[in-house]
Image (cartoon, rainbow, N blue to C red):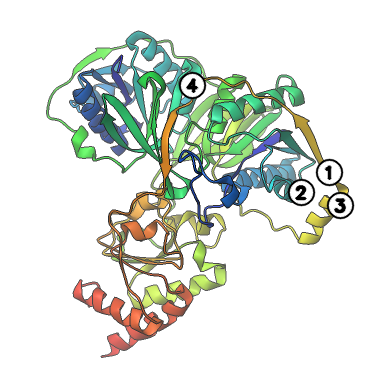
Amino acid sequence: MNGGILVLAEQLKGEPTGVAFEMLGVGRTIADELGVQLEAVVIGGEGDEIASGLGAADKVLKVDMGDDQMPVSDTVVSILDQVSDKRSPALILIGCTNVSQGIGTRLAERRGLAHLNFCTKVNIEDGRPVFTSQLFGGKIFADATLPEDKGVVSIYPGAFPAEAGKSEKTPEVEKIDVEVPESPVVFKRFIEPEIGDVDITGYDVLVSVGRGIQNPDNIELAEELAAAMGGAVSASRPVIDQGWLPLTRQVGKSGMNVKPKLYLALGISGAPEHQEGMKNASMIVAVNTDDKAPIFDISHYGTTIDLFDLVEVLKDKLEEAKGT
Amino acid sequence: MNIIVLMKMVPDVVEPLEIAEDGKNLDKEAIRMMASESSEHALEQALILKDSVGAEVTVAAIEAPELDDALFSASAKGAVRVIKITPEQDGLRADISASVLKEFIKQECGSPGSDTLIFTGSQAIDDLQGELGPTLAEQLGLPFIGVVTSIKPVEGEEGKVTAIKEYSGGLRGEYEVALPAVVGIQAAEQPSRYVPFAKIRAAMKSGSIESTEITPEVEGRGVEIARMYVPEVTGRAEMIEGDPETVAARLIEIFKQNGILG
């Protein structure tokens, strides 16, 4: 690979996000195997404090943003473009997250580079990085290389160990001066999560419903089952988007990250965006008539019987068990 | 306000997906295409703005199987114009699709004005090589904001909208966007409206789909796909077989063994 690796140390509310360390970890592995430099870019925020925590990088490039604590994606693209001019990296790693959405694509377009999205695995084969991406809701994988091993790769959060990107070392920090253009998009404020009727992050048992619940009237079945187990009802994105449950019940990429003792997934296929919010539950039980649904790949137990046939019987048996 | 919704057709992943003989693409014969969910949300958000503040909504999409149905549905829901762009393109190259749509926007608006919003879906399940919205924004030299779940005009300020963008964990951000701009819609402020089949049939009878042909500018900087495949299962769940009684009894046993039930 002709050139080093540049990682955008993604931040949210002044803190580096988990994917920043995941990218540093995978970037470190590639850099060591191919004998190239790994550099991290910190844009704005508490730059000095964040930079000092990025010891997995050989060097941290710090861009001061003054009072702008949440630079918009167009601004970040412009800054990364200028930093890339100065450093000529072969590979640029960006988080495939809501925070960074669009940055990798736009940067690649501006620099005439290839962009590979949804990356969940990297192998070095014959001295070349081979990237695996997941597509079509996690049902299909693709192995791909970049032309001349140069380009932008968006790293899917939760796919790589964040610990591998954490180091006690103090990195060399270099301040980089760039021109910060004004953007027609202006960040105004954060909107904190609404405090809803139920805080799903606080329950040991979650009965979670997906598209398979079919219509809003059937949510009541899940509510009854959850009540019989002392749990709460959560949901995947399609149920929330239909307005069948409030946003506060959403599990996944944009929603809540939950770690209950039991996550009972009813009619949820297990798209990567959903898995991101629940895969660390102590026990996952999936009920889905599609035996190829990705949810079964991360579940401890599963069944393909119809959820409507199961839920009533399970609820009755749970109530019986309580009575004995 | 002038809103152009760029709809994207993607494979229906509820159906089984198969790999083509070359091992590098989906078997197109074996898939059913549908408008991407976020495209549908983009259309709904445009129609919400049309209803609330008045807007002319145009829906356009690059030719794909089942596209006519999606366009007739959009027309029945309230799009003033629905436009098919031929010929069909490979959906995995966002830069190629964007180059077609850039030419389309130029044909439609020349240079988009401060009353123009271009909506795309935020991200599609087949965006292997980039995302359509930001690629198009870059090619048009327009601002972009994605993962948007709400958009409203700024009161008293022509040519500006307030957009709400999702981050994670329920946290969101409010942005002010000066138009023209490309906006990636994650979800509309309300579920997609229901349209009775009679209205779709009426749209079909009126034959209202316009058509335009645009040849893409192809550049040789796509990624090199070595293979596409159905992932091997590494940690498959222990499957519980039997009738509902048997499965329920086994689940309760498992819950008890693991201290989930008292």
Q: Nearer the viewer, residue A142 or B101?
A: A142
* Quadrant of image for the C terminus of chain B: bottom left
Mark 1 belongs to chain: B
User: Residue B221 bears which disc, if any?
Assistant: 4
Q: Earlier in the sequence, mark 1 or mark 2?
A: 2
Q: Residue at x 33, y 57 (%)?
A: A297
Q: Nearer the viewer, residue B112 or B20?
A: B20
Q: Which residue is mark 1?
A: B208
Mark 4 belongs to chain: B
User: Residue B72 bears which disc, if any?
Assistant: 2
The part of the image, by quadrant, that contains residue B201 is bottom right
In this view, the residue farthest toward the left is A168
Q: Is residue B25 left or right of residue A199?
A: right
* Quadrant of image for the N terminus of chain B: top right
- Where is residue A260? Give x, y as percent: 29, 61
Mark 3 belongs to chain: B
Q: Earlier in the sequence, mark 1 or mark 4?
A: 1
